[in-house]
Image (spheres, grey):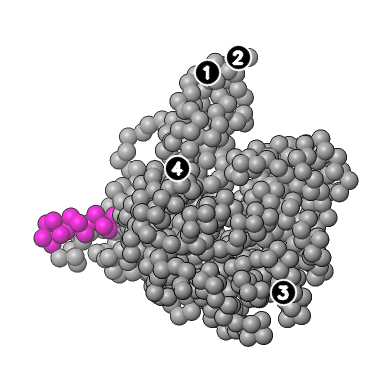
Amino acid sequence: MERFKKVLVANRGEIAVRVIRTCKKLGYRTVAVFSEADRAAPHVLAADEAVPIGPSPAKESYLVIDKLLAAAKASGADAIHPGYGFLSENAEFARACRDAGLVFIGPGHEAISLMGNKRQAKLRMIAAGVPCIPGYEATDADDEALAAEGARIGFPLMVKAAAGGGGRGMRLVREPAQLRAALQSARSEAANAFGSGELILEKAVIDARHVELQVFADEHGNVVHLGERDCSVQRRHQKIVEESPSPAVSPSLRARMGEVAVAAAKAIGYRGAGTIEFLLAPGGEFYFMEMNTRLQVEHPVTEEITGLDLVEWQLRVAAGERLPLTQEQVSWKGHAIEVRLCAEDPANNYAPQAGRLLGWRLPAREGVRIDHGVREGQDIPPFYDSMQAKVIAYGPDRETARRRLVGALHDLMVFGVTTNKGLLLHVLGHPAFRSGEYDTGFIGKHAEAGAVERLYQPGAKVQALAGVVLFHGEALKLAREAGLDASLVNWNTAYSAHPVPLKLVSRGREEQVVVRPMSSERYSVEVGGETFDLAVLGMANGVLDFSVAGARERARYLRDGDSLWLDLGDGAHAVTDVTFRPPSKSDGAGSGRLIAPMDGRILRVSAQAGATVKPGDVLAVLEAMKMEFQVVADVAGTVEAVNITVGAQVSARQLLVVLTPEKKQDA
């Protein structure tokens, strides 16, 4: 007798689309759930049915167990796939599904509960003989006890939230003087993210790689591993690039790590898909970090090199079937690399970006797969994770996969919100990544803040091209309105006598661009002391064909009012024409007018009217896309007005707090 016929996917975005695709392949009916922000999202349209579950914030929709169970009952679904994130590793949810007579497509609630607590998980792994990092795992230790144990373990040291992962509640402490502050901030972040401020300590393994093993188990006692993934390129302990196989893992090391991973899964009576995460030291020693009791974001790289569908395996195991393959039958071929395309601004401390997706074009290249859950014209809401798509490239070898991935990113176009595309290309092209000799410190070593800021600041060439596109576009429009042929654009008897100065603003910086028409298609453009010989060879349907000093190139563009989005392949730049805009005093550093850097929810407010503050004082904390951001005083002075309350939803550039700067005393 079959256990289920209809699957409700308790998630959103690309993973919901991904799960629905395989469910349909196997003949299961599918049900999507959606918040108010996701009414017309691709995962809703992909499913056979869709059920609304409440307001946009996840805590009022995707994280409400009763609403998900009610949606299953209303739709007649008899199984629930949790995807990843949200409630995928919530033992209470797994138990509630079981009690409601629903098949939970994942492990049992006992395994989720055990491995969801880093302290308990580590103790169980130690008992099972799995190598673990030296540390301190006592229950309910206060800051005094943790400070004492930190001194015993020695520095550098990792402070970790016991109840969760994803980099939240985690701090690297390099010296004793930093420990107490790290404990306080990690505890606060962990309590907000996971509902528990419990912490553990571990000795920091320096220059390590983050290598994880994919495991699968069925209810008949069979357990296999499907090889490793290298997830060492991270920022804030959140993965950016993943690849398989790891450049640092030999066949013999893979076999040893695989044996340990299988033993770990057997030790807890595991069932379904899981990931055992290890730190791999430079000398080849590896240590257990945690187990993720769900499908991972980066599972496609494993699928690419094994030829397997891991969601299909999940469904078959949940249906009571045995694993499709034995360990001896599992094989690996080629190499796969995945990057996470996120709506965030790496040059602005990785601030999440919300807004309208004005342009969205995906590449069609051999060996390239793109998993996504967005569409052009859709609003990217501030309530959820910033990842919008995963771009995966496969090749017979690592370098082929890397080149294919670089080419795919060059072709991929996103307009309307800033993304990390430029950073991803920087990482993939860096010699350290190309060599395979990198570790978890890659971003700190090779993508420091200054370098990333330069990546996202448009250069003179981009500014010159933007000026030409804006000017030429207006000239074409005027020519069409006058009924003139395009060859008569810019026609006059003395082109060089009519330079046109433009004021363009990008990322808060104003640049003067002087455009001088030389013919109907050629321009001489001056920017910052440089002169460019540009020609517009074609400009239609968002594609710009142009030449610079005779060399032909191509770019994507999109006009949005006075703004122009332009991507020459290295990432989108937004340039605004302010030539005719009257001067105005804008909010900025040192103004005392503190604005929201993005859409989000107010977590904490410490500002009080009448209070005296100094530069750097934290006046409020904003949560956006599962990250916290501090709103700090930019001047010394007095709080004049506080326009926010805890829990309030705010929009980007909304005025939050007003300060009255202190008056400077005359000398």
Q: Is residue 8 in view?
A: yes
> Which three-letter amino acid code belongs to the residue tagged 2?
Gln
> Which three-letter amino acid code belongs to the residue tagged 1?
Ala
- Look at 74% across and 74% down and name the residue there: 259
Q: Are marks 2 and 3 in contact (CB under 8 Å)?
A: no
Of badges 4 and 1, nearer the viewer stands 4
Q: Are marks 3 and 1 in contact (CB under 8 Å)?
A: no
Residue stretch in magenta: 471-484
Question: Mark 1 = which residue?
Answer: 609
Of badges 3 and 1, nearer the viewer stands 3
> Which three-letter amino acid code belongs to the residue tagged 3?
Gly
User: How far is disc 4 from disc 1 in space, using C-alphas?
Assistant: 31 Å
Q: Splitting the image into 4 quarters, where does residue 248 fall?
A: bottom right
Dot 2 or dot 3: first in sequence order is: 3
Residue occupying the far bottom of the picture: 329
Of badges 2 and 4, nearer the viewer stands 4
Q: Are marks 2 and 4 in contact (CB under 8 Å)?
A: no
Residue occupying the far right of the picture: 152
User: How far is disc 2 from disc 4 in space, using C-alphas?
Assistant: 51 Å
